[in-house]
Amino acid sequence: MNEKALSRRALLGAAGGIGLSAALGVSGQAAAAPAEPKADVAINPDGRYPVVPLTKDSWTLGVAQARSIPVDLSRVEASRRDNLNHMLGLIDAAFAFGGGPDLLFFHEFPITGFGAGWTRQDVLKVAIEIPGVETEAIAKKAKQYGAYVVFGSYARDPDWPGHALSITTVIGPDGRILSRGWKARNIKGAFGGEIELFTTTIYDVLDRFVEMYGRDAILPVIQTPIGNLATSSVQREPELFRALAIKGAEVILRTATGGFVPADVAATSLYNSVYTAVSNNAISPGSPFFEDSNAGGSAIYGPDGEVMAIAKSPNETLVTARIPIGAFRARHRQPTIHPQLYMDVFNGYTPRFPPNLFDNYQPGDLKDAGRYLRDKGVWK
C-alpha cells in the first residue's frame, strides 16, 4: 500500500459534512457519508433500494446540448476560461424565461473539449481539478438558481499523479459537490490495435481504486431529495446500467461527445424501467474537427424506453421533460431478472483485456496506448 493510498484512506475515514466518500460518488445520502468507505456492496433482498425522502413529487430535467471546443494548447488558461464562460452563459440561458430545470445536464467535455491529437501531458494541462476554479464558478450558478448541475470533464487528481481522468461531477443546489464519478471503463480493441484511449478509468486501476475507496464506489448511486441519480460516460455495456438500476438508480445521466447509439440509451430505460438522459455535443463552430461531427440527438427517455423529449436540431439547445418521481418511486422496484439462469456464464467469462493495466504504466498518447495494449489481450 503506497503512502498516497494510506493518506487517502485516512482522509476518507476522518471526512465530515458531505464526506470525501460522497464526493467520490459512494452510494449514500448526499449530505452525509459513512465514516469509512464500504468494502462491499449491500443489495436489499426485497426489491427495494436505499433512498432519502423526496422534497418534490415532480421535477424538470434539462439536457444542455452544448458545443465542444478543444482548449487551445497555446493559451490554455484563457481558452479554458472561454469555454467555462460559455457554459456559464448557457446555465443563465436555461433560466432566462422562468423557473428553469431542477437539474441541468451537460455533455462529457464542455470545459476542456476533446483533442484527438492530444498527448497525456496535453490532457493533464487542459484538465481541471475538482474542486477547483471551474467547479466554484459552476457552484455559484447552481446556488443562484437552486438547481443541480451535472457535467463531464477531463480532470487531474493529486492522489493519482500522472493519471488523466474523465470525471462526471454532480453539484447540488447548495453549491456542494455531491459526486465525482470516474468513467468506469474505456473500450479497448476497437480501433484496429493502432490506437487506444489512454485516460485512466476505474477498470484500468481496479484493485487500487477498490483499496482506496471500496467496491461500492465503482458504480455510484447518489441519493438526493429529487431521486437516486447515477452518471456514466460508458457506451454499449448494458450490464453496467443493469447493475446501477439494481443498486437503486432511478435517473441515469449518460454523457457523450461525438455521438452515441440511441438504441443503447433507450434500452437502458426499457430494460431497467428507469429514466435515462443522454447529453451529446452540439454543432461546434471553430472546432478543429468537422463542426457537425456526430452532433445532436440529446434526449430523455422514460421507463418504457420511449422518447420523452429530444433535440430537434444539432445546434445548441435545451431539452426538457418532467420527471414524476413521486408516482414513479411508489411503484418502482429493482429490475426483475433471473441470475440463476446465467450467472455461471458470467462467472466463467474471461474479459479480453484484464483490469489494472494502467496501474504501473500510463501511455503517453493514443499511439503509445495502442502499442502498449497490443499484446495485453488474453483472447486468441
Image (cartoon, grey):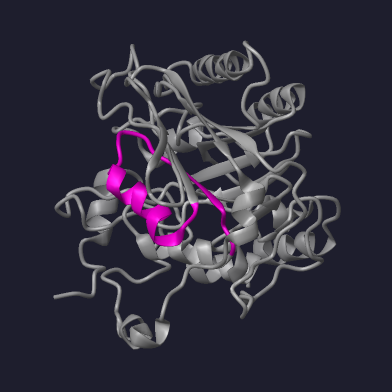
Location of the N terminus by quadrant is bottom right
- The residue drawn where x is 24% and y is 53% is 370
The foreground one among 308 and 356 is 308
Magenta stretch: includes residue 253: yes
- Magenta residues (range): 248-274
Location of the C terminus by quadrant is bottom left
- The residue drawn where x is 73% and y is 41% is 56
- Where does the image place residue 173, in percent across and percent down from the top left? 74, 34
- Where does the image place residue 37, in percent across and percent down from the top left? 71, 68
- Where does the image place residue 3, in percent across and percent down from the top left? 68, 65
- Residue 228 makes an appearance in the image: no
Left of 201 or right of it: where is 194? Answer: left
Left of 102 or right of it: where is 154? Answer: left
- The residue drawn where x is 69% and y is 30% is 147
State whether residue 297 is above or below residue 336. above
Left of 161 or right of it: where is 196? Answer: left
- Residue 126 makes an appearance in the image: yes
The foreground one among 303 and 212 is 303
- The residue drawn where x is 43% and y is 67% is 356
State whether residue 188 is above or below residue 309. below
- Where does the image place residue 11, in percent across and percent down from the top left? 78, 59
State whether residue 223 is above or below residue 79. below
Residue 27, image quadrant: bottom right
The foreground one among 9 and 35 is 35
Residue 135, image quadrant: top right
State whether residue 289 is above or below residue 210. above
